[in-house]
Image (cartoon, rainbow, N blue to C red):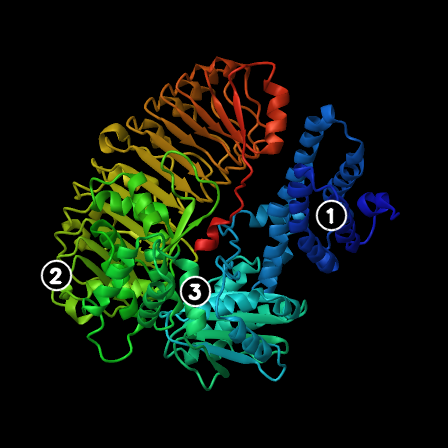
Amino acid sequence: MTDWVDLGLGSVAGALVSEALKLVIEEAKKYKSFKPLSKDLVSTMERLFPLTKKIDSMQNELDLGAGELKQLRQTIERARVLVLKFPGVRFYEKSNYTRKIVETNEDLAKFCDIDLQLLQYRNQLTLLGVAGNLVDKVDGLSKRMDGLVSVPVPVFRDLCSVPKLDKALVGLDWPLMELKKRLLDDAVVNLVVSAPPGCGKTTLATQLCHDADVKGRFKHIFFNVVSNTPNFRVLVQNLLQHNGYAPHTFDNDSQATVGLRNLLEELREDGPILLVLDDVWRGAEPLLQKFRITLPDYKILVTSRFDFPSFGFNYHLKPLEDGDARALLIQWASRPDNTSDKEYEDLLQKILKRCNGFPIVIEVVGVSLNGRSLRTWKGQVDSWTLGETILDSPSQPTVLECLQPSFDALVPNLKECFLDMGSFLEDQKIRASVIIDIWMELYSKSSSILCMKYLEDLASQNLLKLVPLGNETEDGFYNEFLVTQHDILRELAIRQSELEAILKRKRLSLEIREDTFPDWCLNGPVVNASLLSISTDDLFSSNWVKIDCPNVEALVLNLSSSDYALPSFIAGMKKLKVLTITNHGFYPARLSNFSCLSSLPNLKRIRLEKVSVTLLDIVHLQLRSLKMLSLVMCSFGDVFYDSEYIDVSKALPSLQEIDIDYCYDLDEFPYWVCEVGSLKTLSITNCNKLSVLPEAIGNLSKLEVLRVNSCINLSELPETTDRLSNLRFLDISHCLGLRKLPLEIGKLQKLKKVSMRKCWRCELPDSVRDLEDLEVKCEEETRLILWERLMPKMRNLRVHEEETEHNLNLLQMF
């Protein structure tokens, strides 16, 4: 056997770090029946393995001595000992053995998440040509941590991953074979798949990327959605971040081109590269040429509604043939009862004629008929025959015309919800909570549960996709769902709104490129819209025109610039209830003119995403109707100390819910939150710098839900938590550093549920025995530990094993 002592602890070359880890992984995979070993530990080590290879390759360059890597080597050696010892572990030793595995796994994960990210950051600086003196000034890994950890730039991954195949594919076998043949041909460098919308271009490209032969040929496969307003610099930034490099702002496209070339040259050393550019629009030839870098083993695949003959080989994807179209319809729509073969075949043929071979139309129509009666099938066909929709047109129907009947068949409330989806950006991944916030205020009788049902109903008819990101959480917390929509369905929604005159529309979208406004809004118009969406690009200077919007109840602002002033005409939106501001740039945008919100008497919900804002500014606005404040990926700076006293209970008397998510520089909790006496729900999730909650949190006497999920540096909850007499749900899942709960938590007699997934080290105090019918949610390894600790203490505890895990990087949406 290999000399493990030398590999793990001796003074050996850096290459042995990855070799040692590889051997431990292979050994651990043998024990599939024991999840803490076969799943968690193996998963962490596999995540660590490519990074240790990077250490190996950078050893001489980084001057990493044996002392600096000693802790990593020792941890790998501990993992090896645990793996080899496993076959002899007895049943009664299993919980103690689990704890040791958990501790080793956490130590490896910490090195993976912190120390090696710094190594990657150093490598990224070299890649972009800006390394120079910064790396020279730091000496050793510990000093690098001091010098670089203050950089407020989290590295988001999974931005260019190939989408998963989520449905059975019909009619694409031959196109797949033809396209694969071209792609694997050494003489072909660039390919374009063109077809009308809804024919399955993206599905075909996705299936191609998952093909075993293609994956065997290309070491790196990247999937980038381009859409109708492409930004070359953003696309390159996505590729860099996806490969582990910190975000870098390019001043111009030339810099981005250099960064792209350097990245491709580095990746090509590991193997061939395939870059997919999906949904490229007419006029994008200059963009494609920037990606067209002459390198061996680098190919580009483009999907588009349009041909680009000068770019590369064009493959024209056709609508489905009759047989495939019929098979797809039968797959989505079950045969109605009491139907003769002849009658059924006649209905199928009439429906297929309307669908015109477009897969997306067949899916939408099929879902709408699935499980429905024969009368419904006949009624749908008769409505077409009577000319209610598109049969008046003598030419072949377009895909939008084919989809129109599916919209017409919706019940009124779902029609309204579907039309609202046109107010979001093309190809945007939207958190369900954003849409639910808008619907709860636009349709005032709707609860969050009912609004979620609307999303599920639309998804069940294939009019949008509802993607679960992890575990569905309790109490109407819908951040764990993303909503996406095919661009042709978004166009269908927009088309309905465009039937009205611009200033009379109920929903209005305003797109501003640089500082160019549409002609209709240059003379101070009065608009009728209740839902207004305004989108600006990274060159917008916040030089606003005047627009009168007296009826706007929901305002959606999409921005990309680093500085953004809110339009002053917001002050005139006296009916405004919901404000959503989303920055699509890479760094938090600095917001100004926040004071225009102070005159809005009905503003109930504010959601800010990836902006830099002073939290005290929100208090100073004194929004007496504000019920919910959501802050996602925001930067606050030093915002917690102010000499001016503010009576928060009077400034925000109606505030009931605060949601803070992925706010990386939140290292200290805002003091004023503990003075919001009306607060019922407090959610702080994925805030990795937060290490402590204030003692004053016990002042929140009306708090019912406390969620501190995935705050990995949080070590304990303050003892004053036992004063939250109305608390009924506590979520501490994925707080890896949490060691204990308040000693007197048993005083919380209304506490019925505690979610503590991945809280292996957390001790439940003896006072929990005073809680009647407490429900604890966790996964298997935590359950083993809780069983050992708590069964002697209480009889009423119910421990639920959760098989599902929080396995998603939420930054996929951005």
- Name the amino acid, label 1: Ile
Q: Disc count in the image?
A: 3
Does residue 105 appear left or right of residue 426 in this picture? right
Q: Where is residue 776 in the image (x, y as percent from the top left)?
A: 51, 26
- Name the amino acid, label 2: Lys
Q: Tell me the distance, in whole angstroms, between the alpha carbons under discs 1 and 2.
A: 64 Å
Q: Nearer the viewer, mark 3 or mark 2?
A: 3
Q: Where is residue 802 in the image (x, y as percent from the top left)?
A: 54, 35
Which residue does the numbered mark 3 point to in the structure image?
Answer: 328
Assign a secondary structure to mark 1: helix
532 and 190: which is toward the camera: 190
Q: Where is residue 73 in the image (x, y as percent from the top left)?
A: 76, 44
Q: Residue 600 carries which label?
A: none
Q: Nearer the viewer, mark 1 or mark 3?
A: 3
Residue 491, located in which quarter of the rendered image?
A: bottom left
- Residue 293 visible in the picture: yes
Q: Which of marks 1 and 3 is nearer the N terminus?
A: 1
Residue 428, located in which quarter of the rendered image?
A: bottom left
Which residue does the numbered mark 1 point to in the structure image?
Answer: 25
Q: Residue 504 carries which label?
A: 2
- Residue 200 visible in the picture: no
Q: Tell me the distance, in whole angstroms, between the alpha carbons under discs 3 and 2.
A: 40 Å
Q: Which of marks 3 and 2 is nearer the N terminus?
A: 3
